[in-house]
């Protein structure tokens, strides 16, 4: 389960990414190693990605670039978008989000624990 994921630190807010990683120019190896784009080909099992389409913190391009890499690699994550929502869901959308997470765990984790 990944909600509003940071897929590549070079696209994240400078105040967090560069505080810990320096700039992409100063630390290209660190940014390369921490990017999930190159790891899309290694995806195994189930992964649900959930984003708010208007997220100013983890902009949708993070997830869209990862989904593109997964399509290129032939891996199959699940993806759900809340149109008009930001980084955190509120009101009924928050309830829906938590129901979706619970259902995903019930569908894909519970069967593993009850052989």
Image (tube, rainbow, N blue to C red):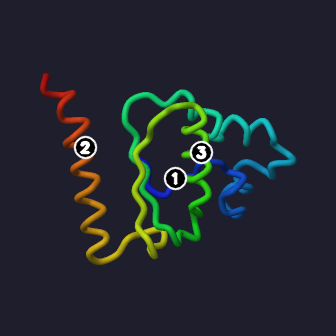
* In-front residue for pair 22/90: 90
Q: How many marks?
A: 3
Q: Earlier in the sequence, mark 3 or mark 1?
A: 1
The residue tagged 2 is 105
Query: How many angstroms separate mark 3 from mark 2 (CA)?
Result: 25 Å
Q: Nearer the viewer, mark 3 or mark 1?
A: 3
The residue under the point 23% across, 51% down is 102
Which quadrant would the C terminus be assigned to in this image? Answer: top left
Q: Position of 4 compared to 38: left or right?
A: left
Q: x and y percent of residue 23 in the render?
A: 81, 52
* Residue shown at 26% from the left, 65% from the top: 96
* Side of 53 relative to 32 (left or right): left
Circle 3 residues within 10 Å: few <14, some 14–19, many ≥20: some
- Across and down, in percent, residue 75 comes to 49, 33
Tell which circle, 1 or 2, labels the residue nearer the N-terminal end: 1
Observer-nearest of 102 and 66: 66
For the point 45% across and 37% down, the residue is 76
Q: Please, is residue 45 above or below residue 104 in the view?
A: above
Pinpoint residue 49: horizontal percent, then vertical percent. 43, 50
What residue is pinned by disc 3? 68
Q: CA distance from mark 1 to mark 2?
A: 18 Å
- Which residue shows up at 49% across the image and 31% down it? 43
The quadrant where residue 108 appears: top left
Tell which tag, 3 or 2, sits nearer the viewer: 3
Callout 2: helix, strand or loop? helix
Give the labeled residue for mark 1.
5
In the image, farthest residue toward the right: 25
Q: Position of residue 17 (x, y in %)?
A: 69, 55
């Amino acid at each position: 389960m990944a909600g509003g994921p940071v897929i590549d630190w070079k696209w994240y807010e400078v105040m967090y990414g560069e505080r810990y990683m320096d700039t992409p120019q100063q630390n290209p190896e660190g940014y390369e190693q921490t990017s999930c784009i190159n790891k899309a080909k290694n995806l195994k099992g189930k992964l649900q990605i959930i984003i708010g389409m208007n997220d100013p913190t983890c902009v949708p391009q993070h997830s869209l670039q990862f989904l593109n890499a997964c399509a290129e690699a032939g891996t199959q994550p699940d993806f759900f978008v809340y149109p008009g929502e930001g980084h955190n869901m509120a009101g009924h959308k928050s309830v829906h989000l938590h129901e979706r997470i619970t259902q995903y765990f019930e569908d894909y984790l519970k069967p593993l624990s009850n052989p």
